[in-house]
Amino acid sequence: MDWREQRRQWREQRRAQRHEKYEKGEKGEKGEKPEKAHGDLTGAVVGGGILIWLGLLVYFNAIGLISSSYTSGYFLIGIGVLIVLGGLVAHSSSGRPFLGYLFGGLVLIVLGAFALTGFTTYVGAIFLVLLGLLVIGFAISARRRSPPPSSSAPM
């Protein structure tokens, strides 16, 4: 049997197992709750919120309520807040981990604050470089802590 056929059979088995777990209402492999028939609306709500926020900022800029030089800062802060709120909703509805949403949202809020205060000099650049190194470091340490996938399952 060639490797493509083995992989296809393995995928079919996994699909059947997930379907059985869903039908029984069991938790999945990583402890997540089974998906509901109506689906998760978190992404749509956050995406719609971002569009609404952008529309409000364009309107506020058009009527002179905010300066166009501050629009990007407010936009980043608003997206950061929406991501954190979306993470709270996702965590409460499906039990998804919240830390990634919180970290991503806070990064955008800080970048928006930099944009509002005019921190566009080397301090902002150093912050971004350090933040990137921190993200890479966390990813490497998390990978070292988790066991490698078993070699018996085809990819």
Image: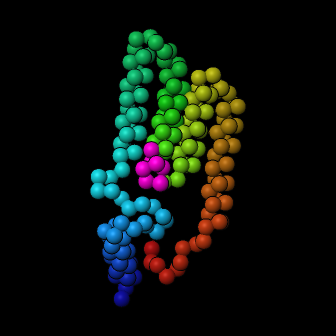
Identify the residue at horizontal 59%, vertical 38% (top origin).
107
Q: Measuring 67% from the left and 60% from the top, which residue is drawn there?
A: 141
Q: Is residue 54 visible?
A: yes
Residue 94 part of the magenta-drawn span = yes
Depth check: 8 or 99 in front? 99
Percent x, y of residue 66: 48, 15
135 sits left or right of 89 in the view: right
- Image quadrant where one finds the N terminus: bottom left
Quarter assignment of residue 11: bottom left
Picture layout, residue 111 above or below residue 142: above
As drawn, 56 above or below 23: above
Part of the protein shown in magenta = 89-95
Q: Quadrant of the C terminus?
A: bottom left
Vertical side of 54 occupied by 34: above or below: below
**Extreme bottom residue here?**
1
Residue 16: name its quadrant: bottom left
Question: Is residue 17 positioned above or below 37 on the image?
Answer: below
Percent position (x, y) of residue 108?
56, 36
Name the residue at 58% across, 44% down: 103
